[in-house]
Image (tube, rainbow, N blue to C red):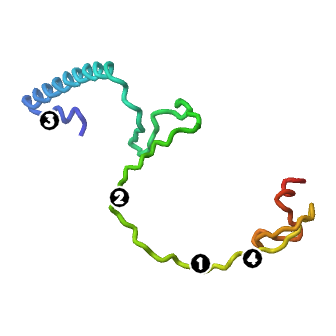
C-alpha cells in the first residue's frame, strides 16, 4: 500500500485530523529544538559514548588518535580499608603436609668457562651447557 492509496482511502474528517496532528507535531519539534539549543549552550557538552548502529556494530565516538596520551608515572594509592567484613571469622584448620620430595639437582659443567654448578635436570639438556654468565657471550 503506497501513501497515495492510503491518503485517498481516508474520509474528509480523517484527513483534517491527520493534517492537524502533523502541524502540531512539527510545531512541537521546532519548540523542542529551540529549547535543546538553549540547554546545550548553557551546559557542558555530554560525554561521547559508543553508538550501536542498526547492523549491531559498535562504533566508538572518539578516534584513538584524538585522545591525549597519558604518561605512565607513579601515583598515590587511593585504596582505603573500610573495615568491611570484620564479623566474618576464618576457622582454624590443619595445613596439608607436603608430599612432594625435594628437587634433585645434578652437577653440570659449563663448556665455555669450565665452571661446575648444580642445576635442575629439567633445564639441562644436551652435552654443551652454558652457565648464566656465559649465555650472553658468543
- Picture coordinates of residue 77, whole percent (x, y): 49, 42
Query: To which residue does mark 2 refer?
Result: 85
- Label annotation for residue 9: 3
Residue situated in front as seen by the camera: 36 or 137: 137
- Label annotation for residue 98: 1
Mark before the other along the chain sequence, 1 or 4: 1
- Picture coordinates of residue 116, whole percent (x, y): 88, 68
Task: Give the spatial CA distance, label 2 vs label 3.
Answer: 71 Å
Label 2 residue SS: loop
Mark before the other along the chain sequence, 2 or 1: 2
Query: To which residue does mark 4 refer?
Result: 104
Residue at the spot 13% in from the left edge and 25% down from the top edge:
20
- Label annotation for residue 116: none
- Picture coordinates of residue 67, whole percent (x, y): 52, 31
Task: Give the spatial CA distance, label 1 vs label 4.
Answer: 16 Å
Q: Nearer the viewer, mark 4 or mark 2?
A: 2
Residue at the spot 35% in from the left edge and 54% down from the top edge:
84
Q: Nearer the viewer, mark 3 or mark 4?
A: 4
Task: Give the spatial CA distance, label 2 vs label 1.
Answer: 32 Å
Amino acid at each position: 500500500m503506497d501513501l497515495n492509496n492510503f491518503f485517498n482511502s481516508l474520509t474528509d474528517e480523517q484527513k483534517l485530523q491527520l493534517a492537524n496532528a502533523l502541524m502540531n507535531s512539527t510545531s512541537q519539534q521546532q519548540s523542542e529544538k529551540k529549547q535543546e539549543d538553549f540547554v546545550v549552550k548553557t551546559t557542558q557538552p555530554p560525554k561521547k559514548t559508543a553508538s550501536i548502529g542498526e547492523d549491531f556494530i559498535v562504533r566508538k565516538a572518539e578516534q584513538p588518535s584524538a585522545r591525549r596520551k597519558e604518561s605512565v608515572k607513579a601515583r598515590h594509592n587511593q585504596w582505603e580499608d573500610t573495615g568491611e567484613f570484620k564479623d566474618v571469622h576464618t576457622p582454624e584448620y590443619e595445613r596439608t603436609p607436603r608430599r612432594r620430595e625435594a628437587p634433585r639437582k645434578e652437577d653440570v659443567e659449563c663448556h665455555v668457562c669450565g665452571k661446575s654448578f648444580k642445576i635442575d635436570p629439567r633445564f639441562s639438556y644436551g652435552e654443551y651447557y652454558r652457565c648464566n654468565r656465559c649465555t650472553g657471550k658468543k
